Amino acid sequence: LADDSNLVIGGDRVRHGIARREFGATGVAVSEVGFGAWGIGGGYGGVDRTESLKALATAEELGCNFVDTAMVYGDSEQVLGQFLKGRRSKWFVATKYSGQSPGMTATIEKQLQALHTDAVDLYQLHWYPRGQDEHLLDELERLKQAGKARFIGISLSSAIDMRDALARPPIDAFQIPFSLLEPEPFLACLGMLTRNRKGIVIRSALHKGFLTGKYKSDAVFPDADDQRHKLTHARIAAIVNQVERFRFLEHDAGSMAGAAARYPLSFSPVSTVVLGTKTEQQARSNYGEVPGTLSSAAIERIRVLQLKLGLRGAAWRRWTTRIRLAMQGTA
Ligand SMILES: NC(=O)c1ccc[n+]([C@@H]2O[C@H](COP(=O)([O-])OP(=O)(O)OC[C@H]3O[C@@H](n4cnc5c(N)ncnc54)[C@H](OP(=O)(O)O)[C@@H]3O)[C@@H](O)[C@H]2O)c1
C-alpha cells in the first residue's frame, strides 16, 4: 500500500512521505492525506488565488493526489480547474452534486467544464437522498455508466445514513466527518465500515481549524464569509477548551494538527483524510509532515477523554445498539 518513493523538490532531496491507501475496492490508491478545497473557494473567508494555486502545487510536490471540492464551494472548482490544466492525470478529483437545478446531469457538465476535464474520479451526492430525492441514486449510477464519473459516492452525516448507504452496493465511496471532537457517527459504524470495502473520505478532521490548536478562547472571525463568523463567543470558548484537553497528543505527534490528522488515519477503513488547506504554509504543514498513526495507548486515552467530555453520548450508544440489532434481524 505504501508508496515511499523519493522526490526531488527545489534541489533538495525530500522524502516523499505521504503513504498511499487503497480507495475501497476501486483498485486505485490515493494519498492518505487529501486536499480539502472548500477553503480555496472562500469558505473560511477571503483568499488570494495565487496563494491557493501555490497551496495546490505544494500539496502535489509533497505527494498529495486527492482533492475534494463542490460546486457550492464558491469558486473552488474554477481555481482547481485552472490548476489542473496540464496535470489532470496526477490527481484523483472528487466533487459533489449539491441539489442544483436543473438537475444532476446538466450540473455535472458545468462542473466538468470548470474543472477542465472530461470526467471526475469521484462524483458524490452531498447528502443521503430520501423520499422524493431517491431517484438521485439511479442518476448517479447512470453518470458512472456514461463515463462522466469513474466512481460514485455519498457524503453522509449519520449512522442511519451509513447503514442505508451500505445497502446500495454500486456506491464506491462515502465521505464522513470524523475528528477528536466528533468521534461519532464514524466510530459507531466502525464494524460496518470494516466489513464493507468502500473508499472512505474523512472530512472535518481539523474541526474548522480549531484542532490545529492555534485558536485561543477569545478568537474572533470578523470576515462575514468565514463560516466560523456565526459562532458565538461561548461556543468558540467551549470548542477551544475541549481542544486544550487533547494537548497531550502534541508530545507524540509533534503538533496538534499532526495529531488531529493521525487520529482518523489510525483506523484501517479510512482511505484519505481531506484537510482544508488555504495557503502554501498550511500545505507544507499538512502534506510535508508525515502523519502516520497514533499509538494504541494514545487512542485509548482519547477514548476515555471523549467519554468524559460527553463526545460519545449514551443516547448514541442506545441508538446504535438498536441499529445493530435491527441489522441482525433481532429487533
Ligand atoms: N458535507 C460535506 O460533504 C463536507 C462538509 C465539510 C467539509 N467537507 C470537505 O472536507 C474538507 C475539509 O474540511 P474543512 O475545509 O471544512 O475544514 P477543516 O479541514 O476541518 O479545517 C480547515 C481549516 O483549518 C485551517 N488550517 C488547515 N490547515 C492548517 C494548518 N496546517 N495550520 C493551521 N491552520 C490550518 C484553515 O483555516 P484558517 O487558517 O482560517 O484557520 C483551514 O481552512 C473541505 O474542504 C471539504 O472538501 C465536506
Image (tube, rainbow, N blue to C red):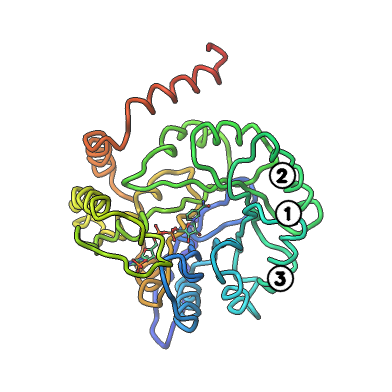
Q: CA distance from mark 3 to mark 2?
A: 23 Å
Rate crowding at label 1 as few (under 14), some (14 to 19) or many (20 or more) other CA atoms within 10 Å.
some
| Residue located farthest toward the bottom when viewing the structure as drawn | 11
Q: Which residue is mark 1?
A: 104
Work out whether mark 3 precedes mark 2 in sequence or the reverse, and give the earlier one.
3
Disc 2 crowd rating (10 Å Cα; few below 14, some 14-19, many 20+) is some
Q: Which residue is mark 3?
A: 117
Indicate the position of residue 95 as horizontal and vertical percent values: 61, 59
Apparent side of residue 173 relative to residue 304 in the rendered image (left or right): right
As measured in the structure, the alpha-carbon distance from the residue carrying label 1 to the one carrying label 3 is 17 Å
What x and y, as percent, mark residue 331?
53, 12
Q: Tell me the CA gap for discs 1 and 2.
A: 8 Å
Percent x, y for residue 12? 38, 84
Do the numbered discs 1 and 2 sit on residues whose CB atoms are within 8 Å? yes
Secondary structure of the residue carrying tag 1 is helix
Q: Amino acid at mark 1?
A: Met
Q: Tell me: 66 left or right of 284.
A: right
Disc 2 residue lies near ligand 1 with CB under 8 A: no
In the image, residue 246 above or below residue 253 = above
Amino acid type, mark 2: Leu
> In this orientation, does residue 315 appear?
yes
Which residue position is annotated with label 2?
136
Residue displayed at 57% across by 76% down: 79
Going from N to C along the chain, the mark reached first, 1 or 2, is: 1
